[in-house]
Image (cartoon, coloured by chain):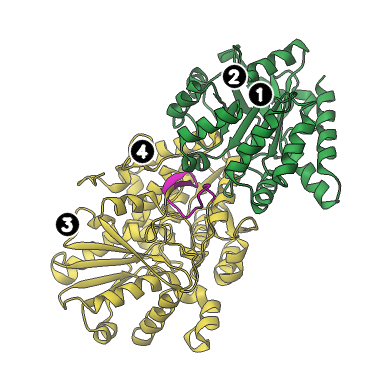
Amino acid sequence: MLNPIDLAFKKAKNENRPALLTYTVAGDSTKKQSLVILNAISKYADILELGVPHNTPVADGSQIQTSAYRAIKNGIKIEDIFWIVKKYKKNKNSKPIILMGYYNMIFQYGEKKFLDKCKKVGVNGLIVVDLPWPENKSFIKKCKKKSIYLIQLLSPTTSKERLNKIIRDSHAMNYFISMLSTTGGKLKVSAKKIMSNYFKIKKVNPKKNVVIGFGITEKSIKSLKKADGLVVGSAICKKISVSIQKRQNPVTNVANLVKKLKYKIL
Amino acid sequence: MKLKKGIPLIDQGNSLGFWGGKFGGNFVPETLKKPIEDLEILFNKLKKDKKFIAERDKYFKNWIGAPTRFIKLENLTKHVGGAQIWSKVVSDANGGAHKIYNATVHCLLAKRSGKKIICGDTGAGYAGKMLSMAAKKFGLKCKIFMGAKDIERQQPNVKAMKKNGAEVMPVYSGSQTLVDAVSECMRFWVANCDTTAMCVGSTVGPAVFVRICGWSTSQISRELKVQLIDEFGSIPKKLKLYNCVGGGSSSFGFWNEFMDYEKKQCEFIGVEAGGPAKSKRHAAPLTYGSKIGILHGAAQYVNQNSDGQIEETESISAGLDYPGISPLHCFLKDTKRARYTAASDEEALEAYKLVTKYEKLRPSLEPSHAFSVAIREAKKMSKSTIVVVNSCGDAYKDKKILINRLGKKYA
């Protein structure tokens, strides 16, 4: 049986477009509201990344930091995040869920217990920002046993040799970081350059899906549409922040943004 | 878990950079893997290179002013009435603190790697001040990340950094102290690692930074060993080395050369920041039994909640105000080679009052923590015991806090 993540890519490919992946922070701005947002964007997005907020995020730019601090301030706990996923998965239109966060949260919860819980509530994949290869080798195996994908990050600084090894040990989906940046940085390299790096990665194993993320906005998304999938995160987090500031409804604003993103890549 | 003899502690980590199999490592975003590997290769090569070591020693001697003094605190010894109390006056070093050793070595490495910019974090402002001095000396552009709260309370060092031409970047996230400054500095490096070198201000961060810093500050114990032999003819039979511990760079450097001696002969006592006496918050993860967690790329004992969120710390001393601790000290604690305890804000202030009353020495609030415990324990020791306290920083930067807490006559 195909992992639901593979199915999502397959469906997008059949429609001749990249898969659209969104990133929102669990509990932003509240537990309930983040669930409502997931439900609202499911109509347009193919895979949903759900950020596990951490208070010393070494790879996140200001937009995602703001969302994470807001969620933590509003009391979000790891059990609440599992609750959000569980509730969300009851929605019959639910999409695959990828939890994205930092290793200390998993380490404190216990790797095994964390994966058991993920399996139970319906998490399909994990991205652990600060657990790179080869440090993640044993965790990859544990994830595999539970049929949860551990998605590997690849960067423009990743050497050819390392790339081969990482992809060899990876599951069926990898994540290419478009440029040297924290999340949400301004796209400082051309789409052409990004795509050329992307195809180098793709060549290592064409069967594995590769998504591109970091710095992708409404403006730039179209230029990268040849990828298997595209991730938009900071732009969505920003939308939530601005909506709160302007006393507008973050749910409709975010849903509209994701809808627009989807139309750009059709 | 065991210490090995005859191998420098910085080189006792395993292939993934873990000391004792569980402290340290490289929990970093993929983007930093390559620059960290490059730095490791460079450092491993240069630390064996005689020319490089000669270059380092030249700057340590002529520019930093090695060796710093080793003095007996006669009046304090008399007043306390127990062990002989001595001090290694590391604050004699150019710039006024031990942070200059690490900053100098990082700038030398940056030059060798062809980088034109260097970024660094700072708490008390010493690491930043020293990095700005070294960067200026070696012709590098310098960017310093500092918590907004620390900028407010350590103004003299901020002014010094700016005077040296460094750009001081205030960090407003989280608790606005050292922990956030280190995070922001790492984020900056993630985005600029192709042009910029990073200096981590203490023996924390990914394994290679722990090693470089420890290698650099070990100058302190190299000097002390010679000075002890000059003074006593040999290493004393009962030697107690007291040092404050925040990230752990000065204490590690103060102890390194004595690592292979038996604990009975050379005891190491690390003093963490206990925070205000009436507060539950502290910066003493080793003393108060914090759990292992991941902070800034390394596994270590760290103040955190059950979810793994890093907890805010509280200390009068910005330099010790850090929720984690060097993996080297975690290792030294678990192998029982060093003993760790804490002093409160109030105890550090009392010690400062006492030291400045009896001696011509003005330890900053960080070493005042170490003095507090050393004075308390020296009382009960024999006259033949040699207590040495590392006075690793000067109180000039603490003027504002000292006036506030003790009144004008102490500042």
Q: Amino acid at mark 3?
A: Glu
Extent of the magenta region: B293-309
Q: Amino acid at mark 2?
A: Ile
- With respect to residue B159, does A163 lie above or below? above
Q: CA distance from mark 3 to mark 4?
A: 31 Å
Q: CA distance from mark 1 to mark 4?
A: 38 Å
The x, y position of residue A76, in whole percent, is 63, 47
Residue B195: image quadrant is: top right
- Location of the N terminus of chain B by quadrant is top left
SS class of the residue under badge 1?
A: strand
The lab-note entry on whether marks 1 and 3 share a chain reads no
Query: Does B72 sit left or right of B342 as displayed?
Result: left
Q: Is residue B46 magenta?
A: no
Query: Does A164 sit left or right of B67 as displayed?
Result: right
Q: CA distance from mark 3 to mark 2?
A: 54 Å
Q: CA distance from mark 1 to mark 2?
A: 11 Å
Q: Nearer the viewer, residue B338 or B394?
A: B338
Label 1 belongs to which residue? A211
SS class of the residue under badge 2?
A: helix
Nearer-N-terminus badge (1/2): 2
Query: Which chain is the one coloured yellow?
Result: B
Front of the two marks 3 and 2: 3
The colour with which the image depicts chain A is: green
- The reply to whether dot 1 and dot 3 touch (C-beta < 8 Å) is no
Label 4 belongs to which residue? B45
Q: Is residue B307 magenta?
A: yes
Label 2 belongs to which residue? A201
For the residue carrying disc 3, how many other residues have a C-alpha within 10 Å: few (<14), some (14-19), or many (20+)?
A: few
For the residue carrying disc 2, how many other residues have a C-alpha within 10 Å: few (<14), some (14-19), or many (20+)?
A: many
Residue B44: image quadrant is: top left
Label 3 belongs to which residue? B262
